Image (cartoon, grey):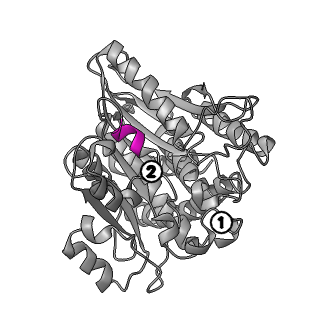
Amino acid sequence: MRWITIHCVLIFQVFLFAEGIFQEEELRAYLSHFNATRNNHVDPTAKAVARDYIIQLFVKHGLDTWTEQFPSNQENYPGLNVIGLLPGRYYGTSQDKLVIIASHYDTVSTTNGVDDNGSGMAALLHAIKNYTTTDEDVKCTQNHTLLFVAFDLEEVQDRGSCGNFSCGCARALCGSGYFVSNLTRYLNETGGSIQGAYVMDTVMNYNSTPNSQVLPAGAGHVMPPEQLKRISDNLHRGNFLVAIGRKVPDASLQKAFYDSYKKDDDFRIEDVLLPFTGQTSKLPSLQRYAMEAFFRSDHRQFWDSEPSWPAVFLTDSADYRGFMTVCYHELCDDISHVTPEMITSLGKTADALVGAATLLTERMCEAKKAPSPSTGTRASSTLVMTCLSVLIWFFAHAY
């Protein structure tokens, strides 16, 4: 039995190493599909190719998948959100408490958009794969419905091309606004609710170089002194993911993600708890101005809906860190900047989303019972089966 144990340990260590290699290759492969401008004013074909790739993977991993069309600033190119659903036990009833994981896939007209926001899409797709991939002898159920959403037209659109056609997307955050409006109507009909949404936008840019992290102008009015000191004591390294939420409405969402994230000295999370509840539009103008840098993505549409829904914004801080201080919305936001540390950070984000979703949807997975051994080799057989289970798990997650 001892040699079986030793071999199992060695096999497991090899598999862990190999899994890390496969994860890096997989995440880089995802990013490679988002290394071109995804903007209908520049290249509608490239954008359609990226969208088709998203749909393909949603379907491949068993999501009930559809697109949601809405008006844009171009008559021939409407906005298209991609939505994938994993129904829970309470789907369509007043007991359902939806969980949403979202990211936008479009870009401005001047960038390849790998960090903004190919990184968010890569984390989303990796989370889908890891959440839905289980051994065939394992059955999983969940109480609450999980939605994965790829938003279109998060970025500000060109209004000069509207001509005689009415601009349907006068500002930004159009796809998420349309989605939230439709979802709110659906929940009003069913009586269900939303536990909250995790919204990712620029989540890859890990940078452990001193002074690589800049803070937005309003940070001193929002972040507590001890948090500012912690960042300063860390020599303003950009080696953390930022999780932004309102202090009360989004606290449980932030905690679920924080507890699921595998933190260490090199990969950290900074929770930013904004001192208000409800809608950003109802804040006094000076307070809203001070916090504007913390509002600028699709999570804002959840906060500003009626009723206001919980949402947490996950970000690397975009143009406040490292190469993105120069490359934000520029062509140099491309795959050439991707480092192994960025891939590790991206994988940790995806894994934490899976952990948080598992907790919030009340997901349970049970293995089918194997026949009891009929000889005196029960312990050895158990270890062999454990090794086989490791093999099965590895190959299920690697391909």
Q: Quadrant of the N terminus?
A: bottom left
x 67%, y 36%: residue: 73
Query: In the visual, does 270 lie left or right of 350?
Result: left
Would you say residue 166 is visible in this rendering? yes
- Closest to the observer, 250 or 122: 250
Please provide the residue range marked out in magenta.
300-304
Secondary structure under tag 2 reads: helix
Of callouts 2 and 1, which one flags the residue occurring earlier in the amino acid sequence?
1
Q: Which residue was labeled with disc 1?
A: 333
Q: Which residue was labeled with disc 2?
A: 384
Neighbor class of circle 1 (other Cα within 10 Å; few <14, some 14-19, many 20+) is many
Would you say residue 1 is visible in this rendering? no
Residue 194 position within the rendered picture, expressed as x and y whole percent measured from the top left = 32, 31
Whether 12 is drawn above or below 95: the answer is below
Query: In the visual, does 252 lie left or right of 117?
Result: left
| Residue 51 falls within the magenta-colored stretch | no
Whether 26 is drawn above or below 318: the answer is above
> Magenta region's main secondary structure?
helix
Secondary structure under tag 1 reads: loop
Residue 195 position within the rendered picture, expressed as x and y whole percent measured from the top left = 29, 35
Q: Amino acid at mark 1?
A: Asp
x 61%, y 46%: residue: 105
Marks 2/1: CA distance? 48 Å
Residue 9 position within the rendered picture, expressed as x and y whole percent measured from the top left = 43, 65
